Amino acid sequence: MSLVARNLEAHGIPTLVIGSALDIVEHCGVARYLHSDLPLGNPCGTPYDRDMQLSIINQAITLLHSATVPNTTERTPYSWSDDNNWRDDYAKVDDSNREELARRGKERRLLQTEQKAGGIERAAMVADG
Amino acid sequence: MAEVYDVPYMERTRNYYRAQGYSTDYVWAHNAHTPFAPLTKPMSESRVGVVTTSMPDTALGRTQRSIYSTLTPPIPESMYTEELSWHQAVTHTDDVNSYIPLEQLMLLENKGVIGSLAPRFHSVPTEYSQRRTMENDAPEILRRLREDEVDVAMLVPL
């Protein structure tokens, strides 16, 4: 998505990215980025929290016209919870799932080979987590 | 309260794939220079376009990862997000407003904060191939947003 944003900027359309993967977006480099410190899946706010969701988009609109240089990052004031369990959990690899992941990888490669043979090549980059 | 840290998604993903037996690490896009287009008019006069990585929750959207444009209103009750890498163990994507800001932008349009919301939003697939994104998807999204006559674009990856 950051690449799509960069192409729009290069052709004169101002953009703002709202996301939750700070390292990936900043590694690529976008003009304006509003970072939501929430689990991947809800960059516009906690599900069904209409006040938070509206406040985040209000902040996005403000950032759109306040940013004057590229690679401008701002954070929303919201967080998911007081503990780090969700942060620690994402794509965790430890003794509890090592064997399961190895098995899943084998299955996935088989599926990808079959899909490729069947003409489906647009596989998602990451399918789980 | 525990000390807050930003999840190192690139590192986690690399390790996760290595654990699955993949021998080649994914290389994320990295650029030294970032293009920047200044706003040409106030937000209160601007038309805003929205781009999402979720797919339409239709027979086609569920089976074919591609670019789609969806007229709005209405706001879709659901989108297809199964193949995306969101954090399924701790959250869900049942509330479309939590990842596509259509309702929010309609409210802000009514309040005069933005000029208008574009009459359709666009779905773009996340791609393993950066070449395919740059050669196919990015130019097509540009073409469609120009067709919509948007002044600014809000891009929201899950």
Image (tube, coloured by chain):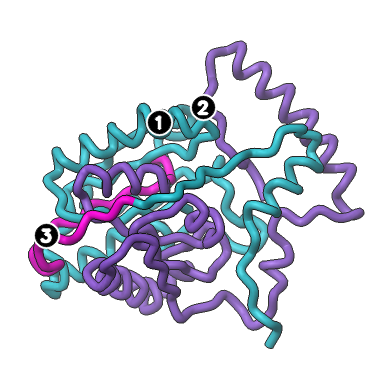
Marking on residue B40: 3
Is A22 left, or right, of B103 in this rendering? right
Numbered range of the magenta stretch:
B35-56
Residue A100 as seen in the image, left or right of residue B68 = right
Magenta span contains residue B58: no
- Type of the residue with mark 1: Ser
Q: Is residue B74 visible?
A: no
Closer to the chain start, of discs 3 and 1, is 3
Residue B150 placement, left or right of B139 = left
The crowding category of the residue bearing disc 2, from other C-alpha atoms within 10 Å (few below 14, some 14 to 19, many at least 20), is some
Q: State the mark number for residue B128.
A: none
* Residue designated by label 2: A122
Q: Which mark is residue B66?
A: 1
Nearer-the-camera pick, A15 or A29 = A29
Whether A43 is drawn above or below B140: the answer is below
Secondary structure under the numbered disc 2 in the rendered image: loop
Q: Nearer the viewer, mark 3 or mark 1?
A: 3
Mark 2 and mark 3: Cα distance apart in space: 36 Å
Could you tell me residue B48's position as x and y percent?
20, 56
